[in-house]
Amino acid sequence: MTVRVDGMHLSAGQVADAAGGPVDVVISEAALERVRRSHDQATRIGSQRPVYGRSTGVGANRDVLIEPSVAAAQALLTSHATSAGRPRSRDRVRAMLLIRLNQLCAGGAGVSPQVVTALARLICDDALPVIREHTGVGTGDLSALAAAALAVQDHSRSYQSEPVLLGPDDALPFLSSNAAALADATLGLSRLTRATRGVLAAAALSFAVLNGNLEAFSVPVERVTPMPGARATCHAMRRLVGSSVISAPRIQDPYGLRALPQCHGVLIDALTMLRDTVDAYLNAPAENPVILADGGFAHHGGFHAAYLAVAADMVRNAAVQSGQLTLHRLTYLSDPRHTELASFLGDGTPGASGVMLVEYVAAGALGDLRAAAGPAAVQSISLSRGSEDTASFASLAARQLLVTADSYDLLAAAELLAAVRANRMRGVTHPGLLGEVLAACAALSDDLGDRELTADLDTARALLARLAEFVDLQV
């Protein structure tokens, strides 16, 4: 995959698509010119006044004047590469590097152009560094980016005689970003956005076999909850279910069916906010101090990623609202009082367990979903002898999004497995779009006998991406 990097137009969707790699990056000439001009401004300003991290120490050492040198820059990089935890997956690292490259191309770092082109070469050659789990507290992913900077230097030795060494204009600016947290947020955003569509396909199958009351998704309800996500959910469910439900036996359905627009809609809206936040950060000159190509200069607190932390917290909390309804629907599907089918959708053998343990697995996933929803943005900490007395913990908030995506996928897969089984047992043929959704699930086994359903859950998880294509969320 080829990605054109210009520091202005990179999107979360592009990053997620490229993260699987390998990826070729092409830096626009306009971006390189912006980098050159920012570097020239950094040289000029650095000769006139103290600049944090160039002619001073960092953290509590910010008042200590130092002589700018390559040696000091290298010491900063090696000390800040300290990290711990298991290595991150290659897709997370690749996404981080691409994001950092685009941010540098926004032209606010003051780094030398050769550093930017060397980072691009690292990405193109897929020479990914080892990045460990614990890298920051939402005020810059210092450890991750220091390791990346050292990798850029080391890799340059493989293709040129004189290696690229980050000097005083390069070292701190390279570190000054939340690119690792943004990478996690981007990947979590991509997976959850896809899952919000797949879960509606599963919910529609459940709704049809449970003979739900379509009034819950009618046009008047779009006025009752006039939020974009709720309206989109109503529209999608009407389109999916169509005429598959002719008459409803209940005046009001249980909440797992009736409250879907409200509980799923809030997740859709939270994801929209997160996407807008991530897209803005991907193209922002994130560095402190910022040294713009037009001469703009400021020491600032833009590295404090409160916007990202709050947006990620919202998504994780909203995923619980949607996910718990998924478990409720799975419970309805297991109950003959709702389906008029065999208990736990078994094969009719007395005492058959059917999908009983699927519900247990889903309940465990909901527990993980709830645990991951613990707010990160309310945390804070004082570091560096008290000179850095607050933190956003965006890194934690974004990392937990990946846990949320895993748990939410598993919940959706559990419902899909049971919903497909119930529809097949009912022996109905759905008209229109819902019939296509059910047909797309042909890979799920029709064996109703008691057996291990682990592989079936894996199949259902794989199907969610395909089913997402049937769902039109007009947000």
Image: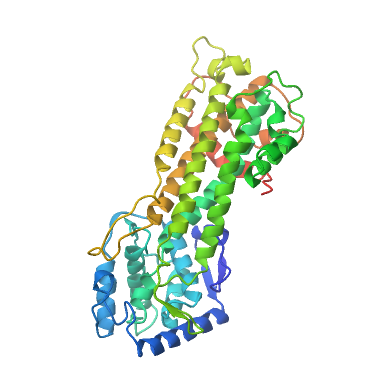
Q: Is residue 229 left or right of residue 286?
A: right
Visual colour scheme = rainbow
Q: Is residue 360 left or right of residue 275?
A: left
Q: At 68% from the left edge and 27% from the top edge, which residue is drawn?
A: 208
Q: Nearer the viewer, residue 405 or 213?
A: 213
Residue 19: where, in percent of width, then height? 49, 59
**In terms of image quadrants, where is residue 348?**
top right
Residue 23 visible in the current orientation: no
Residue 456: where, in percent of width, then height? 52, 32
Q: Nearer the viewer, residue 156 or 320?
A: 320
Q: At 27% from the left edge and 58% from the top edge, which residue is drawn?
A: 382
Q: Is residue 15 left or right of residue 97?
A: right
Q: Nearer the viewer, residue 191 or 118?
A: 191
Residue 321: where, in percent of width, then height? 52, 37
Please tell me whether residue 164 is drawn above or below residue 338 in the rendered image: below
Please tell me whether residue 356 is drawn above or below residue 109 in the rendered image: above
**In terms of image quadrants, where is residue 29?**
bottom right
Q: At 66% from the left edge and 37% from the top edge, which residue is drawn?
A: 440
Please tell me whether residue 162 is drawn above or below residue 427 in the rendered image: below
Q: Is residue 218 left or right of residue 93?
A: right
Residue 434 visible in the current orientation: yes
Please tell me whether residue 439 is drawn above or below residue 266 in the rendered image: above
Residue 18: where, in percent of width, then height? 53, 61
Report the number of discs.
0
Q: At 67% from the left edge and 43% from the top edge, which residue is drawn?
A: 226
Q: Quadrant of the N terminus?
A: bottom right
